[in-house]
Image (cartoon, rainbow, N blue to C red):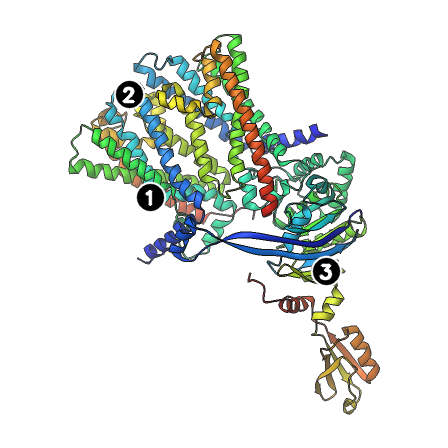
Amino acid sequence: MIGSIEVRGLSRTFHTTVRRPGFAGALRSLVNPERSVKHAVSDISFDVASGELLALLGPNGAGKSTTIKMLTGILTPTSGEARVAGVVPYQDRERNARNIGAVFGQRTQLWWDLPVRESFAILRDIYEVPKAEHAARLREFDEILELSAFWDTRVRHLSLGQRVRCDLAAALLHDPPVVFLDEPTIGMDVVVKEQVREFLRHQVEQRGRTVLLTTHDMTEVERLAERVVLINHGRLVLDGTLDEIRRKYGSTWQVRATLADAHTAVVPPPPGIALLRQDGPQVVFGPDGSGAPTVHQALKAVIERYEVTGVAIDEADLEDVMRAAYVHAGPAAEGV
Amino acid sequence: MNAVRIAWRITRLNIRAQMEYRVEFLLNIAIGAIWQVSVIVFATVLLARFTGMGGWDSSDVLLIPATRMLAHGLFVLFLGRLHGVGRFIQEGIIDIYLVRPLPVHRQVQLQYFPTNAIGDLTVAAGLMAGALSRSQLDWNAGRITYLLACLLGGMLLEAALFTTVACASLRFPAADYWGRWLEELLGTFGSYPLNVLPKAVGGLLTFGLPLAFVAYFPAAVLTGHGHDTGVPYWLAAASPLVGLLAYAAARLLWRWSLDHYTGVNG
Amino acid sequence: MAVLHAWRAARVTPLGELHAPPRMTAVLIRLTVQVVLVASLWSGLYAHSGPTAGLSREQAITYAVLAVLASRLRELDQYAGRDSVLQHMHFGTIVYWYLRPLPPARYHALRALGEQVYGAAWALAGYAVCLAVGVVEPPKSAAVAGVFLVSLLLGQLILYFIMLLIDQWCFWMLRNNSAVLILIFAQNLLSGVYAPLWFFPDWFRTMSGFLPFQATLSVPLSLYIGRIRLADAGGQLAIQAGWVVVLFLVTRFLWRRAARRVVSQGG
C-alpha cells in the first residue's frame, strides 16, 4: 500500500484537428477544421507492488507517456481508475504530488538561471523537507551521482548528463515512495547511464522505492527490471517477467554443439527443440516453435541426450526479442 | 535563380504554416496594424500639441514617422527574423543551419513568414499617402526616387543594427535583451526631428545609434531642412548610402562572427 | 514553512540577476540612457511652448521620467530564466508546475512578487538619483506622496494581473506572440508610458477610462505630479481597487480553466 500502484481499466482518448494537405487544404482547415479521435490508452490494467521496479515498454507512440501522465496526476483518464500509494492522482493532485517524484526525459525542472543547489533549496522548501534530512539525502545522492562536482554551476552551463543526474536527484529529494521516470537516460553516455542505473538500483533495493520506468534501452531493462509491462497501440500486450517475454517472442536462441561422434546425430532432438543444421560433428539446435523451452532447459536437454565435446549458446538479445514483440503485437508502430 | 526559387518555395510553406494557427494568423495581421496605428496616434498627438516642432511645419514632420514606418515594414517583411537569433542559438537551431548547404543568414530569414508585416506595411503605406497628400512640396521624379532610395536605405540600416545585435548574440545569448531595447528606441525616437533634442543627445542618435539616418535626415533633405540638422548637408543627403554601407559592414561582421561561433553549452 | 518556500520562490529572479552581472550592467545602462533621452525629448518639446494639456514643462518631465523608472519594475528579461509560462509550454516543462504540492497560481504570484521587489529597488535608486540631480520634482506634500504610494501599489497589482493574463493566454495558444504584443501595446500606449494620456484627444481618454491600463501608471503618476487633485484621488483609488477585484476574479477563473486544460491535454 505504501508505494503500490494499481491501474484498472485506464483509458484516454484525445481529440485532434486533422490538417488537410496542400495550400487550399490549409485555407479550408482555417475556416472549417476537421476533428478526429485518437485512443492513446485503452483499458490498461496492472499492479506494481511497493518496492518493485517495473519497466513499461512499447514502441514510440504506444501510450507509455500518456499512462505515466495519468499516474502522476497531470492527465485525467477518460475512463478507468488508478491509485498511486492509495491516492487517486488526478483527483487529489497535491496529496499525490507529495508521494511521487518524476523525471520526464530531457525536460528539466531545475531553474535555468540558478546554480543547481539553489534549485534543490527551492524544492526543499516547496516540499517542506527538514534541513538536516535534506542535507543527508543530498550527501547520499552525491555518493553515487557525483553531483558535488557541478552543483554550484548554473543549470544553463551543465552538460546533458550532468543535468539529468541533477534532475533525478531533484525528483527524489522529498523522499517519495513512488518514482516515475519517462526515458530518464535518453541521450546519455554509457558511464552516466551506468551511474544512473546504480542509483536507481540503490533507491529500489535500499530505500524501498517503487519505480515505474519507461525506456528504449534494453540493457537498462535487463539490468534493472524483473518485471515488464508491454503496451502497444494503447493496449496492454504482456505483463510478466523478462523470461516470459523471451519465451513468448524470443524464438531465436541457438545451441551449437560439437558431437563426440558425428554419426550418432540421428537421435531425434528432445521435444520442443529442432535440429537446424548439421555439418559433420557440428550441429545447431533451435526452438521448434511449439512451447519452446528456455535456452537453459534446452542446453540441459541437449547435454543429457547427446555425447558432446563442446557446446555454445547464442541467445537472442533483448533488443531482438522486443523487436519481435513490437511487430508481433500489432501492425508496425508509427515511424520515428 | 535557384536561390530565389528555394526562398519562394520555403516562404510559401511558411505562410501555410502560419495559417495552421487560425487565431494567431489573424491576430498577427491585426497586431502589425494596431502597433503602427499606435505610433501614428502618438506622433499625431504630439504633433497636434507641439506645433512647429523643431522649427518644422507639421505636414513636414509627418514625413518622418511615415518614412520610418515604411522602412520598418519593409525590414520586417524582408529581413526581420534577426530578432530570433538569440533564441535560435539557445535552442540549437543555428547548429542545424550551419550544416545545411544554404547561407545561415538566409535560413534565418526563411525561418517563418512575418504575417504581421502585412499589417505593418498597410498602415505605413496609409500614413505615407497621408503625409504626401498633406505635403506642400513638389513631388517630381527626383524627389520620389530619392524617397524610394531612402526607404531602402532605412530598411538596410535597421537590418544592419539588428544584424549587429544578432552577431553579439552568437557570442552572448543574453544580447537578445539589447535587441528588444533597440526596437523600442527606434520606435520612440525615430519619429521626431532630432534637433529638438540637446546637441549631445542628437549626436548620440546620429553617430552612436545611427537612427537619424533612417528617417530624420532623409525627411530633412526632402523638406529643405537639410542644412540645419547638425551634420554636414552631404552626410545627411547620403543617408541611403549610409544604410547600404552599414548593412554591408554588418554582413561582414556576421560572417566573421559565424566563423568564430563556438556554440552553446559545448 | 510556507514563509520559507515563499522566500525561495520570490528570490529566484533577483538571484538569477545577481549571478549574471552583465545583465545588471545592461539594466543600468538602459535605465540611464532612457532617462536622459526621455528627459531631453520632453524638455525639447516644451522649448517653444508653455503649459500644454494642463501640464507644465516640469510636470511633463517628471511624469515621463517616473514612467521610465516605474516601467522598470517589471521589465526584466522575462525569458532569460526560462521560467515563463510560454517557455514551460514550449519545452513541455509545465508538467512540473502541476507535479508539486505548491499551486501554480501561488508559485507564479510569488515569482512576480520577487521580481517586482527587485525592480522596485532599481526604480527607487533611480528615483533618488533623479531627485538629487533635479530631473524630477519631489511630491508637493506628504499627503500627495502617501496617496501616490497607495495608488502605485494598486497600479502594480493591476499590472501583475495584466501580465498574468498574457501568461495564461499561453495555456491555450502555444505561441503567444501576437496576444502579448497587443497587450504590451495596449499597456504601453494606454497606461501612458509613451506619453501622458492628458495629451490625447478626449475620445481616446474616454475609451481608456473603460480599460484597466491607465490605472497601472497614468493614475499614480498624475497624482504624483498633481494633475489629478487630491480631492479627486478617492474616486481614482476606488476605480483602481475595483479593477484589482475584477482582474483577480478573472485570472483566478482562468487558472482553474488552465489546470483543466493541462489535465485534459497532458501539458
Label 2 vs 1, first from the N-terminus: 2
Instruction: List the residue tagged with mark 2.
Output: B53
In this view, the residue in front, C212 or A316, is: C212
Image-quadrant location for residue A9: bottom right
In the rendered view, would you say B74 is above or below A21?
above
Do pointers 3 and 1 mark residues of a single chain?
Answer: no
Instruction: List the residue tagged with mark 3.
Output: A228
CB atoms of marks 2 and 1 within 8 Å: no
Question: Label 3, label 1: how many angstroms apart (C-alpha)?
Answer: 62 Å
Q: Farthest residue in the bottom direction?
A: A263
* Chain under disc 2: B
In this view, the residue in front, B117 or C71, is: B117
Give x and y (percent) for residue B246: 33, 39
* Chain under disc 3: A
Position of C80 with respect to B21 (left or right) is right
Query: Depth-wise, is mark 2 or mark 1 nearer the camera?
Result: 2
Instruction: List the residue tagged with mark 1.
Output: B248
